[in-house]
Image (cartoon, rainbow, N blue to C red):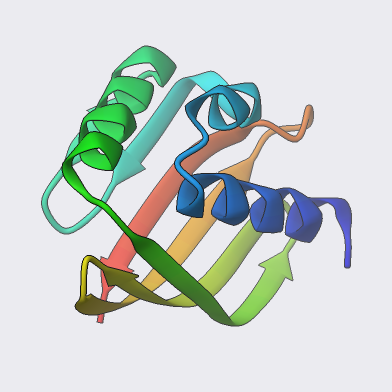
Amino acid sequence: MNQFESMTAKYIKLWQTKNIEGLSKLLDDEIILEDWDNLIKGKDALLKFNLDFFNSVNLIELNVVSSHCFENTTFSELNIIIDGVKLTVLDKIVFNKNFLITQIRAYKG
């Protein structure tokens, strides 16, 4: 497992456990998150978005089906259950040279 894969695994674990403080340490100030419903720009906005989401759900179960890395980008297929609702998601996570996340693109499948 390389550094990018390790940081991706850490991000996924922190997200699953709703750890805002830990997530904050992994994000670049100019991060962009885009998913099927949202476009969030900036670390503060993303942390608020996640906090609001975490406060709206009780249980997040997450299983990494597969994860691959190409240069500074990881691709992870995830099975997620949020309060009983099942989702399959592909996360594309891009890192900068300081191993901070600069972009997250989530595709629902």
Give the residue displayed 52% in from the left and 35% down from the top: 19
Q: Please state the horizontal and vertical placement of residue 10, each as a whole percent of the image.
A: 69, 50
Q: Nearer the viewer, residue 72 or 51?
A: 51
Give the residue displayed 36% in from the left and 73% down from the top: 80
Q: Nearer the viewer, residue 48 or 17?
A: 17
Q: Nearer the viewer, residue 23 or 99?
A: 23
Please state, as top left, top right, bottom left or bottom right, where the N terminus lies in the image: bottom right
Residue with the most extreme front position: 58
Give the residue displayed 52% in from the left and 77% down from the top: 63
Q: Please state the horizontal and vertical placement of residue 71, each as a whole percent of the image.
A: 75, 58
Residue with the most extreme left position: 37
Q: Is residue 104 left or right of residue 2?
A: left
Res. 2 image quadrant? bottom right
Res. 67 image quadrant? bottom right
Residue with the most extreme right position: 2
Q: How many marks?
A: 0
Q: Please state the horizontal and vertical placement of residue 55, each as a whole percent of the image.
A: 24, 35
Give the residue displayed 64% in from the left and 56% down from the top: 73
Q: Is residue 96 above or below residue 16?
A: above
Please state, as top left, top right, bottom left or bottom right, where the C terminus lies in the image: bottom left
Q: Please state the horizontal and vertical placement of residue 52, each as a whole percent of the image.
A: 21, 30
Q: Is residue 97 above or below residue 74?
A: above
Q: Is residue 97 above or below residue 84?
A: above
Q: Is residue 94 left or right of residue 15?
A: right
